[in-house]
Image: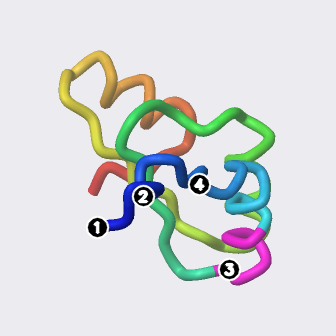
Amino acid sequence: MSPKAGDSVPPAFNAQWEALIEAAPPIASSIMGLFPPEDVRRLKAKRIAWFAVTSTVAEAEAAEAAGAYLG
C-alpha cells in the first residue's frame, strides 16, 4: 500500500449526488441518515426509488415520513 493512501480525499458529496441524479438509476439507498426534502423531491421527479436502511423503529418512521421506501 502506498504511504499516501491515507491522504486521499473522496469526491465532494454534492458532485456525487448530482451524478446520481443525472444517471437516474432505478434505486438509490441511504445507510446513515435521511436525505433532505429537496433531494427527495429530485429523486421522485426522476422516478428513483429511495431505500433507507434504519436501525430503530423511530428511524424507520422518520424515513418513511420523509419519503423513503422501507419495503
Kind of residue at disc 4: Pro
Image position of 47 with respect to 13: above or below: below
Query: Can you identify the residue that label 3 sits on?
Result: 24
The residue positioned farthest toward the top in the image shown: 58
Residue at the spot 50% in from the left edge and 30% down from the top edge: 65
Looking at the picture, how far across and down is residue 67, in whole percent?
55, 43
Query: Can you identify the residue that label 4 sits on?
Result: 10
Chief secondary structure of the magenta portion: helix
Q: How crowded is mark 1: few (under 14 residues within 10 Å), some or many (20 or more)?
A: few
Looking at the picture, how far across and down is residue 16, in whole percent?
68, 62
Whole-angstrom CA distance, mark 4 to mark 1, is 18 Å
Q: Is mark 1 on a helix, strand or loop?
A: loop
Residue at the spot 43% in from the left edge and 24% down from the top edge: 62
Q: Which badge, 2 or 3, comes first in the chain's sequence? A: 2
Query: Can you identify the residue that label 2 sits on?
Result: 5
**Magenta residues, as a range?**
19-24
Q: Which badge, 4 or 1, comes first in the chain's sequence? A: 1
Kind of residue at disc 2: Ala
Residue at the spot 28% in from the left edge and 67% down from the top edge: 1
Query: Taking 40 as reference, is 64 left or right?
Result: left
Image position of 47 with respect to 14: above or below: below
Kind of residue at disc 1: Met
